[in-house]
């Protein structure tokens, strides 16, 4: 399975979020909110 460019960007974003101290739950909540706004 090929990873799309967008997926790589999201992985990098999530990695950064974890580095600055966001919890996995906060990230998941943000991603769900972002998905609903599409």
Image (cartoon, rainbow, N blue to C red):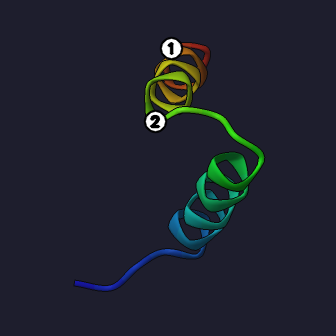
**Looking at the image, residue 38 lies above or below residue 12:** above
Circle 1 packing at 10 Å, graded few (<14), some (14-19), many (20+), is: few
Question: Residue at horizontal 59%, vertical 75%?
Answer: 5
Q: Residue furthest right?
A: 20
- Give coordinates of residue 23: x percent, y percent: 54, 32
Residue at far front of view: 21
Count every numbered label the image shows and give the total: 2
- Most foreground residue, 15 or 21: 21
Which badge, 1 or 2, comes first in the chain's sequence? 2
Check disc 1 and report its element: helix, strand or loop: helix
> Which residue bears the numbered disc 1?
36
What secondary structure is marked by label 2?
helix
Q: CA distance from mark 1 to mark 2?
A: 18 Å
Q: Quadrant of residue 38?
A: top right
* Residue 12 x %, y %: 65, 66
Instruction: Pick the quarter of the image with the N terminus.
Output: bottom left
Residue for point 55% across, 15% down: 33
Which residue in the rendered view is the most extreme toward the bottom?
2
Residue, disc 2: 24
Mark 2, Cα crowd under 10 Å, few <14 / some 14-19 / many 20+, is few
Tags 1 and 2 touching, CB below 8 Å: no
Q: Which residue is found at the position 33% from the left and 85% from the top?
A: 2
């Amino acid at each position: 399975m090929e990873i799309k460019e967008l997926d790589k960007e999201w992985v990098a974003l999530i990695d950064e979020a974890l580095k600055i101290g966001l919890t996995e739950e906060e990230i998941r909540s943000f991603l769900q909110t972002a998905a609903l706004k599409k």
